[in-house]
Structure formats: C-alpha cells, structure tokens
C-alpha cells in the first residue's frame, strides 16, 4: 500500500492559520520551485510552486488540504564579521553581491575564504559561527537578486 504524498503549491510570507508543522532549511535550500522535502518530524511532501521563490524564515507552504508548514531558517556555517567601520565592510560585501545578514554590531555571511581575506585586509575581525542565516532581501522588493537585471 502506498502513502499519498501531499503537495504544496502555495507560499505565503506569514501564517494565515495555525501551523501544522515546520521544515528547517538553510539559505540555499530556501530558494526553490519544485522539490521533495520532509517536515522536521519526518513527513514527506512535494513543493510545486509556479515559479522559483525565495522562502523566508517564518513564511509558510500551504498543502493542498489547507495545512500550513512553517519555514524555519536552519543553522548553517557562517562567518561573523565585526569591526570599527561596519558600514564600510557592509559596502564591500554588497559590492561583491554576497548575501549578508546585517545586525547592529555584526554582519553574517556564508563562509568564503576569499571574502574573509578581503575583509581582514580592510580591518575586520572574523569568527566562524553556526547559526540560522536570514540575509537582507534584494533591492526593489524582489527577494534574492542575481546580477543587475532587476
């Protein structure tokens, strides 16, 4: 006997009903259109969106039966960046189109030895951390950006 796999074809940026379950995904895993996933408690489901979408921490995928599965940013290997001129460091990170989580006293980026070396040369301190990653979205409200064709 086979088990019917539920499908999620709708995504909302916030719950519209009590959430049924959750799925933890890293930053790269939260960029998808069609993929088999499993909730954190092991229930498989298919995501089949009309177009590729960047799923936000706290957003929900809606199963065909109306149940909502919350998106959770999973911990991943990151580089914490601190320094006296955080604005300048953030500019250099953005100038290289590197996703960046901007906080009051630190920046978080995905681990990249080339970017790390550049930042250290600019006076930054870096530290490897494992945390959820929720970088700033792209310009003009389009979520992730790739290149300059906005």
Image (cartoon, rainbow, N blue to C red):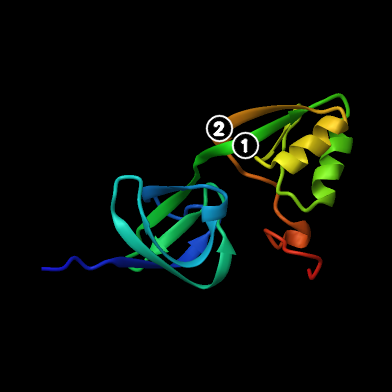
- Residue plotted at (47% across, 52% down): 15
The answer to whether the residues at label 2 and label 1 have Cβ atoms under 8 Å apart is: yes
Residue 59 in the image: above or below residue 103: below
Q: Give how far across and how far down residue 124 sits, in percent.
A: 81, 28
Q: How many marks?
A: 2
Q: Give how far across and how far down residue 95 sits, in percent.
A: 85, 50
Locate the N terminus and report the quarter of the image it occupies: bottom left
Locate the C terminus and report the quarter of the image it occupies: bottom right
Question: Badge 2 local density, few (<14 within 10 Å), some, or many (20+)?
Answer: few
Residue 40 in the image: above or below residue 106: below
Pick the front one: 77 or 32? 77
From the viewer's perspective, is 126 left or right of 95?
left
Label 2 belongs to which residue? Answer: 130
Label 1 belongs to which residue? Answer: 78
- Residue plotted at (75% across, 36% down): 116
Query: Quarter-wise, where is residue 128 in the image?
Result: top right
Q: Separation of disc 2 and disc 1 at Cα? A: 6 Å
- Residue plotted at (69% across, 42% down): 112
Residue 31 in the image: above or below residue 48: above
Q: Give how far across and how far down residue 55 sits, in percent.
A: 55, 56
Which disc, if any, is residue 107?
A: none
Residue 12 in the image: above or below residue 72: below
- Residue plotted at (60% across, 29% down): 129
């Amino acid at each position: 006997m086979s088990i019917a796999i539920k499908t999620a074809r709708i995504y909302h940026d916030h719950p519209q009903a009590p959430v049924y379950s959750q799925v933890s995904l890293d930053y790269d895993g939260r960029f998808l259109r069609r993929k088999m996933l499993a909730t954190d408690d092991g229930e498989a489901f298919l995501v089949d969106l009309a177009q590729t979408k960047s799923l936000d921490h706290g957003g929900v995928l809606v199963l065909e039966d109306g149940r909502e599965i919350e998106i959770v940013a999973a911990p991943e290997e990151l580089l914490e960046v601190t320094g006296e001129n955080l604005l300048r460091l953030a500019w250099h990170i953005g100038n290289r189109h590197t996703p960046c989580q901007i906080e009051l006293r630190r920046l978080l980026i995905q681990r990249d030895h080339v970017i790390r070396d550049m930042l250290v040369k600019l006076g930054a301190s870096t530290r490897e951390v494992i945390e959820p990653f929720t970088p700033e979205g792209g310009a003009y409200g389009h979520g992730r950006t790739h290149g300059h064709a906005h």
